[in-house]
Amino acid sequence: SLFHPAAEIPPAARVRFVFVGRLVPGKAADALVEAFAQNETLRRHQLTIVGEGPDRKLIEELVAKHSLEACVELVGAKSQSEVGEILRRAHVFAFPSIRELGAGVIIEAMGSGLPCIAFDSGAQACLVDTDRGVPVELVPRDQMPPLLGAAMQRYIDEPGLLENHRKGALAYASGYTWRHKAENILEAIRWTTGETTEKPEFYPL
């Protein structure tokens, strides 16, 4: 109920990218800021960073150093309901974390109608695919900004990609609702008890 798509899709003349997570080295939010610093096209769009942590000062210094105040904003920690509202006002979820076990925030973003950009590693690799986002190769830290920048720029340069991936994200996230999970469990029970003979295949896995 907290993470659902907006009734009306925000106009995409200025694409809004959003990051949600703790501001710690493993989440690599600063790499997104550096991507904006290196890419003149991205500077005409928007990055919102939601969260708090020890890397906040570093990120603020990067924003000031590269004069990104007009396109990068840090809004601090927010409640779940506030995060849901922020996601519905955005277009793309950018999540360059390198250490995730579950990455539930990606499902929350997809459930809000946002395609996702994430490294093709760990939990993210199981969630982000080319029908609902842009998987990015996990590379050494100094190589991250240009790759992330290129992934974000795709949603600016390629007409129709944002809408196609939005539909794919919503379809995929629908498999994570409590109702869908309960139906999967019941289907598994029916098969294991012999009530049905066909082994169930669950989507998403």
Image: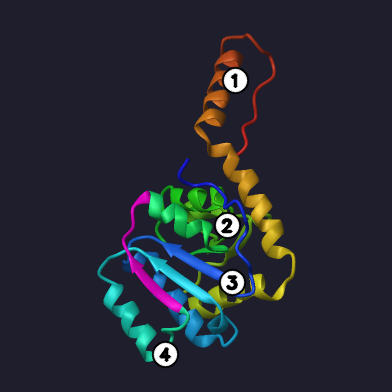
- What is the secondary structure assignment of the residue under circle 4? loop
Among the two numbered marks 3 and 1 on one chain, the one whose residue lies closer to the N terminus: 3
Determine if residue 103 is in view.
Answer: no
**Residue type indicated by callout 4:** Ser
In the picture provided, is 127 more to the left or to the right than 73? right
Whole-angstrom CA distance, mark 1 to mark 2, is 30 Å
In the picture provided, is 39 more to the left or to the right than 23? right
Q: Residue at x 58, y 54 (%)?
A: 128
Among the two numbered marks 1 and 2 on one chain, the one whose residue lies closer to the N terminus: 2
User: In the figure, residue 61 lies in which quadrant?
Assistant: bottom left
Among the two numbered marks 4 and 3 on one chain, the one whose residue lies closer to the N terminus: 3
Which mark, residue 187?
1
Whole-angstrom CA distance, mark 2 to mark 4, is 27 Å
For label 3, the residue is: 15
Determine if residue 19 is in view.
Answer: yes
Q: Nearer the viewer, mark 3 or mark 1?
A: 3
For label 4, the residue is: 67
**Residue type indicated by callout 1:** Glu
Q: Nearer the viewer, residue 157 or 78?
A: 78
For label 2, the residue is: 114
Whole-angstrom CA distance, mark 3 to mark 1, is 41 Å
Q: Nearer the viewer, mark 1 or mark 2?
A: 2
10 Å crowding of disc 1: few (<14), some (14-19), many (20+)? some
Among the two numbered marks 2 and 4 on one chain, the one whose residue lies closer to the N terminus: 4
In the picture provided, is 79 more to the left or to the right than 130? left
